[in-house]
Amino acid sequence: MARKRGSEFSRATDVSLSHASGTMLLKCRCNCSIASKLFAEMPEKDLISWNSMIDGYVKHGRIEDAKGLFDVMPRRDVVTCATMIDGYAKLGFVHQAKTLFDQMPLRDVVAYNSMMAGYVQNKCHMEALEIFNDMEKESHLSPDETTLVIILSAIAQLGRLSKATDMHLYIVEKQFYLGGKLGVALIDMYSKCGSIQHAMLVFEGIENKSIDHWNAMIGGLAVHGLGESAFNMLLQIERLSIIPDDITFVGVLNACSHSGLVKEGLLCFELMRRKHKIEPRLQHYGCMVDILSRSGSIELAKNLIEEMPIEPNDVIWRTFLTACSHHKEFETGELVAKHLILQAGYNPSSYVLLSNMYASFGMWKDVRRVRTMMKERKIEKIPGCSWIELDGRVHEFFVDSIEVSNTL
């Protein structure tokens, strides 16, 4: 009897230690080597421990190590599979993610969300919608807020307004709360689908707006070239004593840039730094360089770049180069272009910008020299891609390519 109790106590102790070790693994995932050593030394590994270790490997991009554990673990659950699906998708292995998803005997909302998110991350937006449609056929499953945010993102990237309004109606019928991330996603979706009016209706219908809702609306106005409306929204935020964040100012500065509002852009930049004590990031400087460059204030834009406390990236330099070309500032533009090619190495857009600038000045010998350089370095211009919806059919176009069409 005593021996039996001792055995039961030993097993209980092992399980307790296993749970404690699982908790420790969760804390050690930032250091895979420590977590791996701890996992190997565990006297008894439960499902939590296996899942924690697999999750740690996935978060560090070590999908082969995660797969190794996945293949030998004695028991799996939906969390295990969802973690692996997420890991495959983040590394671009969408086929492997879908294969694992199809092999799951039971799927819950988390598994569907992982697969849909994986497709969206890899720009397979129509495939994400197909997974959502499959999920709808499962009578025992109901989408959650995360599901809908993912799907709204897919629709936004496709630009399908008819699908957007259908999904909005679905959300209203299911009585989902729009005060959180879902409201933000709806505003963003309508803006990207070309209907700023629908986006504004959603925004105005949200009673307790967070700064995220304001930011989404400002971003939508910026995309639609409504700079004055975006700037006025910033003034409204100030009047209501709502605290803006750095994203707010990225949106407003971007709107000012697209609409050529130099004075408003400068005011916004100063308001951010002086009143709200927000340290400008690369995006803020990039917008300011664009605002000044577009207005022809090349010297001011150049001074701003030189005075930046952080290293300007190639996007800022390309913005400045485009302005130099547009405003016929050849000498400055050529220096910037050569700097860009040295800095960016094999980024095709830098070469294309330099070639276009030479062409605008009729310097065809230099145009040929740049294009020869691109050919020698095997640098190819990335083709543009766009989608258009006609009669419920999405058509995908690539520059210099045949049409590829899909139906949903």
Image (cartoon, grey):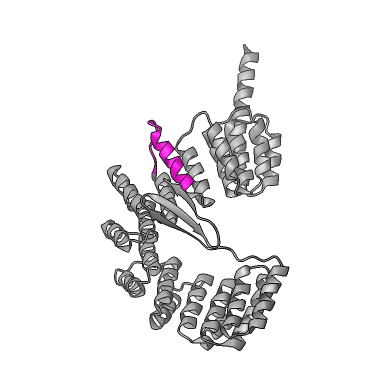
The furthest residue to the top? 1
Q: Position of residue 335 (x, y in %)?
A: 64, 83
Q: Position of residue 232 (x, y in %)?
A: 32, 73
What is the x, y in percent for residue 384?
A: 53, 63
Q: Name, please, the residue furthest toward the front.
A: 402
Which range is magenta?
A: 126-144
Does residue 24 appear in the picture of this structure?
Answer: no
Q: Quadrant of residue 12?
A: top right
Q: Is residue 296 left or right of residue 229?
A: right
| Helix, strand or loop: magenta stretch | helix
Give the residue at x 51% y 79%: 289
Residue 133 visible in image: yes
- Quadrant where the N terminus sits is top right
Residue 2 falls inside the magenta stretch: no
Coordinates of residue 98 in the picture (x, y in percent) = 55, 39
Residue 39 position (above or below residue 337) = above
> Is residue 209 positioned above or below 56 on the image?
below
Residue at 63 percent across and 35 percent down: it is 70
Q: In this rendering, is residue 230 above or below 125?
A: below
Q: Front-most of 21 and 259?
A: 259
Q: Quadrant of residue 195?
A: bottom left
* Side (left or right) of 369 relative to 76: right
